[in-house]
Structure formats: structure tokens, C-alpha cells
Image (tube, rainbow, N blue to C red):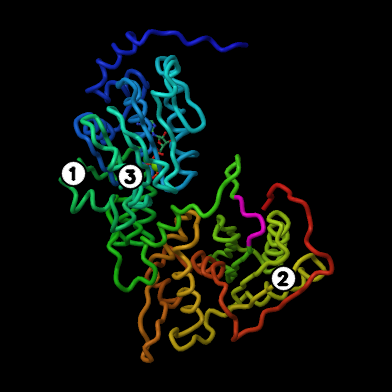
């Protein structure tokens, strides 16, 4: 069936503009049929009154929604506006913010009449070239360049993760009286434009802070859980619940800032289904094997610099874990067309059983399998007290290059582990037992340990890798992922 032709006069739209230009709250109520939370009402009003608005907040309070509303309000209330939107990762931009705009637009018969939502733009149907919002990747400053208009609104989601050079480009376009900028996010980094907006540049911005504790969107359980596990003083609680910048305790081995930055980093392109494109890149799997009981067996895997969500098993025996690892390795080699795999397995406690069975299971399969036993308690070197510290140091060095999934427990475990210097002047990471004493609710830091295993590609002098080589080369065609 043909879609109805959208006809209306600009005069008709102009009446709406006049009505809502100073009143985005009424716009949200009446045109979007939405009911803003109290902080969202305040934020919308700030946006109407001020040029630059910076909002730091805990998780899930409705930041992206506010931004989506701001986009639609600006599009509706200005003639020939431009609304460039950006975020640190393509997924955040195209898979979170853009659908959020669609969600609210599609609820509004009025907006549907004037505007059309497209994959990377929202356009006014009669003036698509001159009246639009657009999603622009923050990968390169050029993407945000060249916008000089009377009515322009820049939206930056997850602003802590956006590089300063992008803001410099935006700054160059904020020249007219009706040029606006909204920057929102979790306050994960204590430097950069987003941090400065609340500190040295606070005279330039209208600022707000939104805690999850004040938000009806976030269940109290979330805050309670993080508080119980990591404490009110922890950076994880400060950043993710309170919307406070991290304190970065001096004896924490990997600061939260570095971990959060890795969760907001693009290291590859994606296909239409948001699968990362990583053909031919090296594959590494890290396996931290649990004791029976409450601990988790965690398998992290990485292709090139892209670390996938962990596979987590409870109360699983070594045979089943080994089968998981062998299956995963086969599928990854096949899917990413890679003839080899490296598997780092923790051989404390139950690990040797898994290692033996993985080696056994890989015999006769395609490809070169480097199955590497790693003892966290093993010897260190001149700079590191033990093997655990070697692994954690390696992970810390590697972190600026990789992408991590936003797995809350992993992020917390990585960013709360402490260290000291031993009597020989070597670094020494806090023992698992000491960590468990500090965070009894969190239990064993298995997720972080599996991740550091997954990031490790250093030498293994102290131990010898087991290699099995296939009789047949890995030439399997690409198949959709099933792991
Ligand atoms: N006032 C509102 N009325 C109804 N739904 C809302 C409102 N505000 C937010 N939401 C919904 O709540 C959910 C969380 O909001 P949103 O994604 O904007 O939060 P966020 O602060 O950006 O989260 P994150 O920290 O994950 O980025 C979304 O599904 C959103 O549509
Ligand atoms: Mg968001």
C-alpha cells in the first residue's frame, strides 16, 4: 500500500515552533506524549535557557532519552536547523541513541507528519538537505566539521569517552546566538572536555548531576548491589551510581578510568547486524577455572583487539569446561578464518584437568592450537613479584589498545584490585585471598583473572606451551556465529 503523502504548510509548523521554542517541557508532554522525570524537566529547561549544558549521571537514568527529546524539540522549533549527534562508539550512536529518537518520534503523530527517521538522519520531509539531524561517528574530527548554521544543536552522548579534538571541531561551530551543545555521560574520566565542563570551564556550562538514587528509572537494587559489593567509596559506585567522577585511589593497579575508556572504544568496523568485522585476526582465549562451589568459571575471548562478552559457568566440571573451550576455539577459527588459536589456561586448582582435556580434544582438529598453561602463583621476574603481577601488568599495558565489553563485574574487579611494592622493589598484585577479604560479597575475582589471561600474549618461559598441529588446514567457509 502506498504511504500517505505528507502535506502541510510551513506556516502550520511555524505555529508549533512559536509555541514550544521556550518550552521544551510542554513539547515533550504534548508533542511526544512523554512524561519527563524531575531531573529531565530541569535539564530541558536549562537547554531552552542556556547555550551549553553538561550532565553527568549514573547508569540508566534516562540520559540518552533526554538527548533524543532535545534533538526532536530543536528540529521542531527552529527553521532549517542542523543537529549533529555523536558518541564514542558506533554502537552507542547507531544502536542506542538513534533508535531512541525513533522510539519517541514514532509515538508522535505530529512529528511523523513533518519528519522522517532514517538510518543515520532525521529529516524534514520537504527540506531534507537543509533541515536535519545526523548521526556522526566520533572517530574523526572531520565528521563533525563544516557545520556553520544559525540554528545548530550538537549532542554528545557518553561524552567522557569522546576525544578532545572532536570537541575542538564542535567548538569552532558554536558561533551563533542559537548554537547549542549538550554533553551527557557517566563521568568516567578525570581529564578532557567533559571533566573540565564541571571544573575549570564550569562558567561556560550549565551543569547538572543525576544520581541513580534520585532516579525513578533505576531500581534501588542496582545501587544496593554495587554498594554492598564494592562499597560507597569505590569508584565503581561513584561513577556508575552517583554520577561522581572517580577518585582513582593511588594503590589501585588499574584505574577505573582506563577500564571505562576501553569499554567506550571502537577497534573495528561492524556489519549490518552489529557483528564486528575481524576476519583473519589472531584469536586468544583466557580460561579461569573455578573450584567447585560459588566461584565462576569464566572464559574470555578476543579476536584482534576486540574482546567479546565472557562465557560464565557455575558449578561446571572440568570436562564440560574443556568441551566449551574446544568448541569455542573451533568456531572462532572457522568464523574468523584463522589457522591458529592461543588458549591461556589458569592451572591453579582445577585448571590442569581442563588443560589436559583441551589438549586432548584438539588432537586431530584443524589448525595450530597453542594451549598455554599459566600458573598465577608462578615465578615473576625482575620487576614483578609473581606471574599474577606479570599478567596484570601486561593487561594494564594492553588496555589502551583494546575494546572491552561493558560487563559490570569485570569492570569492578579490574578497577578495584590493589598492589604494593615488595622488599625487592618489585610490583606485587594483591592476592586473591586478600581481595576476597575486602570484597566478600563479590567473591573471587574470576572475571578479571580470565580477562587478564585473555589479554596475555607475552612469553611463557617458565612453562611450556603445548602445541598441536592439524593434519588439515583450516579452510572452512564462513558460518554465522553460534558461540
Ligand atoms: N521519562 C521517561 N519516560 C519513559 N521512559 C523513559 C524516560 N526516561 C527514560 N526512559 C527509558 O528508560 C530507559 C533508560 O533510559 P536511557 O537509555 O536514556 O538511560 P541512560 O541514562 O542513557 O542509560 P545508560 O547509562 O545505559 O547510557 C530507556 O528505555 C528509555 O526509553
Ligand atoms: Mg545512554
Image quarter hosting the N terminus? top right
**Residue in the picture at 37% in, 70% down:** 438
- If you read the primary sequence from the N terminus, does the residue marked by circle 3 or circle 1 appear first? 3
Determine the CA span between mark 3 and mark 1.
17 Å
Residue bearing the label numbered 1: 204
Looking at this rendering, what residue extends furthest in the right direction? 471
**Residue in the picture at 39% in, 68% down:** 254
Which image quarter: residue 430?
A: bottom left
Q: Position of residue 90 (x, y in %)?
A: 48, 44
SS at mark 3?
helix
Q: Nearer the viewer, mark 2 or mark 1?
A: 1
Q: Closest to the observer: 244 or 303?
A: 303
Disc 3 CB within 8 Å of nearest ligand 2 atom: no
Which range of residues does the magenta coloring cover?
Answer: 277-281
Seen in the picture, residue 419 relative to 415 is either above or below; the reply is: below
- If you read the primary sequence from the N terminus, does the residue marked by circle 2 or circle 1 appear first? 1
Residue bearing the label numbered 2: 369
Pointers 2 and 3 in contact (C-beta within 8 Å): no
For the image shown, how many numbered marks are present on the structure? 3
Seen in the picture, residue 319 relative to 160 is either above or below; the reply is: below
**Residue in the picture at 55% in, 52% down:** 268
Determine the CA span between mark 2 and mark 1.
56 Å
**Residue in the picture at 60% in, 39% down:** 272
Amino acid at each position: 500500500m502506498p504511504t500517505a503523502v505528507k502535506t502541510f504548510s510551513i506556516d502550520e509548523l511555524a505555529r508549533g515552533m512559536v509555541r514550544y521554542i521556550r518550552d521544551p517541557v510542554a513539547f515533550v508532554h504534548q508533542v511526544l506524549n512523554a512524561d519527563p522525570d524531575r531531573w529531565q524537566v530541569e535539564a530541558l529547561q536549562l537547554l531552552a535557557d542556556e547555550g551549553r549544558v553538561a550532565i553527568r549521571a549514573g547508569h540508566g537514568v534516562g540520559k540518552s532519552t533526554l538527548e533524543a527529546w532535545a534533538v526532536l524539540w530543536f528540529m521542531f522549533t527552529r527553521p532549517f536547523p542542523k543537529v549533529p549527534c555523536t558518541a564514542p562508539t558506533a554502537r552507542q550512536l547507531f544502536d542506542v541513541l538513534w533508535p531512541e529518537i525513533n522510539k519517541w518520534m514514532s509515538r508522535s503523530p505530529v512529528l511523523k507528519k513533518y519528519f522522517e527517521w532514517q538510518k543515520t538522519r532525521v529529516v524534514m520531509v520537504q527540506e531534507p538537505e537543509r533541515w536535519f539531524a545526523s548521526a556522526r561517528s566520533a572517530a574523526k574530527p572531520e565528521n563533525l566539521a563544516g557545520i556553520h548554521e544559525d540554528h545548530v544543536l550538537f549532542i554528545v552522548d557518553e561524552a567522557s569517552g569522546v576525544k578532545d579534538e572532536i570537541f575542538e571541531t564542535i567548538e569552532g561551530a558554536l558561533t551563533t546566538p542559537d548554537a547549542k551543545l549538550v554533553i551527557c555521560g557517566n563521568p568516567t574520566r578525570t581529564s578532557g572536555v567533559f571533566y573540565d565542563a564541571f571544573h575549570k570551564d564550569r562558567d561556560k556550562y550549565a551543569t547538572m548531576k543525576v544520581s541513580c538514587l534520585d532516579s525513578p528509572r533505576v531500581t534501588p537494587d542496582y545501587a544496593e548491589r554495587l554498594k554492598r559489593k564494592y562499597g560507597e567509596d569505590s569508584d565503581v559506585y561513584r561513577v556508575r551510581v552517583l554520577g561522581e567522577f572517580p577518585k582513582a585511589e593511588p594503590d589501585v593497579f588499574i584505574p577505573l578510568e582506563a577500564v571505562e575508556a576501553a569499554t567506550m572504544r571502537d577497534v573495528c568496523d561492524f556489519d549490518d547486524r552489529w557483528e564486528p568485522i575481524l576476519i583473519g585476526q589472531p584469536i586468544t582465549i583466557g580460561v579461569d577455572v573455578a573450584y567447585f562451589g560459588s566461584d565462576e568459571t569464566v572464559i574470555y575471548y578476543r579476536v584482534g583487539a576486540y574482546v567479546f562478552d565472557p562465557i560464565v559457568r557455575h558449578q561446571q566440571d572440568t570436562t564440560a569446561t574443556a568441551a566449551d573451550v574446544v568448541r569455542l576455539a573451533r568456531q572462532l577459527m572457522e568464523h574468523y578464518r584463522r589457522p591458529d588459536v592461543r588458549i591461556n589456561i589458569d592451572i591453579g586448582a582445577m585448571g590442569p584437568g581442563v588443560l589436559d582435556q583441551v589438549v586432548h580434544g584438539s588432537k586431530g582438529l584443524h589448525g595450530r592450537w597453542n594451549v598455554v598453561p599459566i600458573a598465577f602463583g608462578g615465578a615473576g621476574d625482575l620487576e614483578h613479584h609473581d606471574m599474577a603481577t606479570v599478567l596484570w601488568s601486561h593487561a594494564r599495558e594492553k588496555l589502551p589498545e583494546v575494546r572491552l565489553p561493558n560487563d559490570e563485574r569485570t569492570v569492578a574487579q579490574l578497577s578495584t584490585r590493589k598492589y604494593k611494592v615488595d622488599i625487592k622493589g618489585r610490583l606485587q598484585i594483591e592476592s586473591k585471598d586478600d581481595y576476597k577479604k575486602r570484597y566478600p560479597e563479590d567473591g573471587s575475582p574470576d572475571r578479571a583473572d580470565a580477562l587478564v589471561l585473555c589479554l596475555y600474549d607475552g612469553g611463557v618461559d617458565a612453562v611450556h606451551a603445548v602445541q598441536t598441529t592439524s593434519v588439515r588446514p583450516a579452510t572452512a567457509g564462513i558460518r554465522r556465529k553460534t558461540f
